[in-house]
Amino acid sequence: MGTVRLVYPPASATFKLGRLAVRKQGRGKGTAQKLIAALEGAAKEMGATEVYSGSQVPVRPLYEKAGYQVVDDEGYLDEGQPHVMMIKTLT
């Protein structure tokens, strides 16, 4: 139904959430929020204190709902799509 990738660089407490994707039939049912929560749980177990992600602008509210905050409103292009960098402090 969906997928997400956790990238954890050596000697860093800041991990990356990447490639979050949910099939169309799974959207609007909380699937993405469950994937994000599972990723954050795994990241915390491995010592993360923060998780960041490059969010496509249209799905920014999804990340905000999960507690992520925009780092820089200027944004950037990734594969021709507008993105903003977002981060969340894990508690």
Image: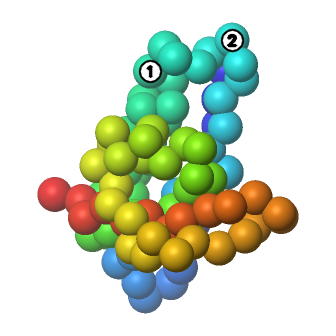
Badge 1 crowding class, 10 Å Cα cut-off, few under 14, some 14 to 19, many 20 or more, is: few
Is residue 4 visible in the rendered image? The answer is no
- Report the residue marked by disc 1: 30
Q: Residue at x 33, y 60 (%)?
A: 69
Q: In which quarter of the image is residue 79?
A: bottom right
Seen from this angle, which residue lies furthest front? 74
Q: Which residue is drawn at 62% across and 16% down?
A: 26
Give coordinates of residue 77: x percent, y percent.
72, 70
Q: Residue at x 51, y 23 (%)?
A: 31
The image quadrant where one finds the N terminus is: top right
Q: Nearest the camera: 81 or 52?
A: 81
Q: Which comes sooner in the sequence, label 1 or label 2? A: 2
Give coordinates of residue 12: x percent, y percent.
41, 83
Is residue 22 visible in the rendered image? The answer is yes
Give coordinates of residue 64: x percent, y percent.
35, 47
Q: Which residue is drawn at 16% across and 57% down?
A: 91
Q: Nearest the camera: 90 or 88?
A: 88
Seen from this angle, which residue lies furthest bottom? 11
Seen from this angle, which residue lies furthest right? 79
Residue 66 marker = none
Q: Is residue 21 above or below residue 54?
A: above
Secondary element at tag 1? loop
Give coordinates of residue 53: x percent, y percent.
51, 62
Q: Give amino acid for label 1.
A: Gly
Q: Would you say 80 lies left or right of 22 here?
A: right
Q: Give amino acid for label 2.
A: Gln
Secondary element at tag 2? helix
* Rendered image coloring scheme: rainbow
Q: In this view, does 7 lie above or below 72?
A: above
- Report the residue marked by disc 2: 25
Q: Nearest the camera: 77 or 12?
A: 77
Q: Distance between the residues labelled 1 and 2?
A: 12 Å
